Image (cartoon, helix red, strand yellow):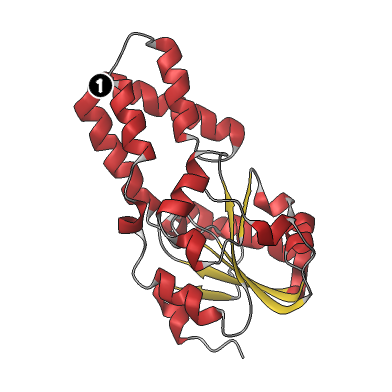
C-alpha cells in the first residue's frame, strides 16, 4: 500500500465529525474472497491438505485476533517445504482482484459521507495482506489515504483520536462486538452503524450476546440515503 502522509506526518485540525469504516464484510465481501480461496486450495493442493491449511488458519485467527491468510500459508509451508504448489496459492492471494468484491455502492457511500467530514478506514489485519487488499480494492484512494490498520482496533481508540481528532465519530462495522466495545468507551461521542453483511452479522449467538447498534442497515449502500447534517 502506498504511504499515507496525512495520518502520521502532521497533526490534524479537529473535525466536527469523522466517519470510520471497517473493511472486511463492511465495504468488501470478504466471505466471497474466502470462498474463492477455498476453491483454489482444493484445486491446487487437494481437499486433505486444504483442510490442514484452514486448521492452521483458524489457529492463527484465534491466537492473533484477525485473519492471517499469508501467515497461515507460511506455517503450512513449514510443514510441507517441498510442495511447490504453494507458490500458486501465494500468487492467488497477492494478485486477487479485490475491487471485484466491493459491495454495491461502497465507494458511493464513502463519497457521500465526505459531504460532512473526513472518511477513514479502521480495520484489523496483518501488515502485508490487509494493506494490499485496501490498495487493490480502490478503497485507499476513495478515503484519500486515510487508513488505520491495527491488531485490535477497539483497543486503539486513543491512537485513532490522535490521527483523526473529532467532536463526534460515526463507526460503521459488521461486528456487533466491535461496535459495543467502542460505544462503551466513546459513549455519546460515537454513532454506531451495524451493517448486516457477512457471517458474523447473521450469527444468532452474536446477535443475542451484544446490544443493538444505534443504527442497523441491511446493506452498506443504504448509507447513501442518510443525511448526517
Q: Position of residue 44 (x, y in %)?
A: 22, 25
Q: Quadrant of residue 179?
A: bottom right
Can the viewer see residue 219? no
Q: Position of residue 82 (x, y in %)?
A: 33, 8
Above/below status of 7 relative to 131: below
The reply to whether residue 107 is in sight is yes
Q: Residue at x 41, y 62 (%)?
A: 197
Q: Is residue 113 left or right of residue 40?
A: right
Toward the viewer: 132 or 22? 132
Horizontal and vertical percent position of residue 25: 43, 57
Secondary element under disc 1, as helix, strand or loop, is helix
Q: Residue at x 47, y 19 (%)?
A: 75
Picture layout, residue 173 above or below residue 70: below
In the rendered view, does 79 fall on the left or right side of 22? left
Q: Residue at x 45, y 86 (%)?
A: 225
Above or below 83: residue 18: below
Q: Quadrant of the C terminus?
A: bottom right
Q: Position of residue 173 (x, y in %)?
A: 54, 62
Q: Nearer the viewer, residue 187 or 101?
A: 101
Q: Nearer the viewer, residue 37 or 211?
A: 37
| Labels in figure, total | 1
* Most distant residue in the left direction: 43
In the rendered structure, the answer to whether residue 155 lies left or right of residue 224 reads right
Q: Which residue is rendered at x = 36% and y = 49% of the image?
A: 31
Q: Which residue is mark 1?
A: 45
Rendered position, 28 above or below 89 = below
Q: Local crowd at mark 1 within 10 Å, few (<14), some, or many (≥20)?
A: some
Q: Quadrant of residue 215?
A: bottom right
Amino acid at each position: 500500500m502506498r504511504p499515507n502522509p496525512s495520518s502520521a506526518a502532521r497533526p490534524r485540525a479537529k473535525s466536527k465529525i469523522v466517519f470510520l469504516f471497517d473493511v472486511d464484510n463492511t465495504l468488501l465481501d470478504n466471505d466471497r474472497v474466502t470462498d474463492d480461496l477455498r476453491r483454489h486450495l482444493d484445486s491446487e493442493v487437494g481437499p486433505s491438505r486444504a483442510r490442514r491449511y484452514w486448521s492452521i488458519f483458524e489457529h492463527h485467527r484465534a491466537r492473533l485476533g484477525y485473519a492471517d491468510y499469508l501467515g497461515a500459508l507460511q506455517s503450512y509451508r513449514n510443514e510441507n517445504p517441498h510442495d511447490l504448489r504453494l507458490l500458486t496459492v501465494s500468487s492467488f492471494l497477492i494478485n486477487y482482484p479485490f475491487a471485484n468484491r466491493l459491495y454495491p455502492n461502497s465507494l458511493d457511500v464513502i463519497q457521500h459521507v465526505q459531504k460532512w467530514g473526513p472518511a477513514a478506514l479502521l480495520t484489523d489485519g496483518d501488515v502485508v495482506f490487509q494493506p494490499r487488499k485496501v490498495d487493490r480494492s480502490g478503497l485507499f484512494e476513495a478515503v484519500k489515504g486515510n487508513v488505520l490498520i491495527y491488531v485490535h482496533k477497539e483497543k486503539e481508540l486513543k491512537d485513532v483520536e490522535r490521527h483523526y481528532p473529532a467532536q463526534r465519530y460515526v463507526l460503521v462495522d459488521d461486528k456487533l462486538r466491535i461496535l459495543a466495545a467502542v460505544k462503551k468507551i466513546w459513549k455519546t461521542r460515537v454513532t454506531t452503524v451495524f451493517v448486516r453483511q457477512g457471517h458474523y452479522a447473521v450469527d444468532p449467538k452474536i446477535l443475542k450476546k451484544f446490544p443493538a447498534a444505534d443504527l442497523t442497515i441491511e446493506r452498506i449502500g443504504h448509507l447513501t440515503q442518510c443525511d448526517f447534517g
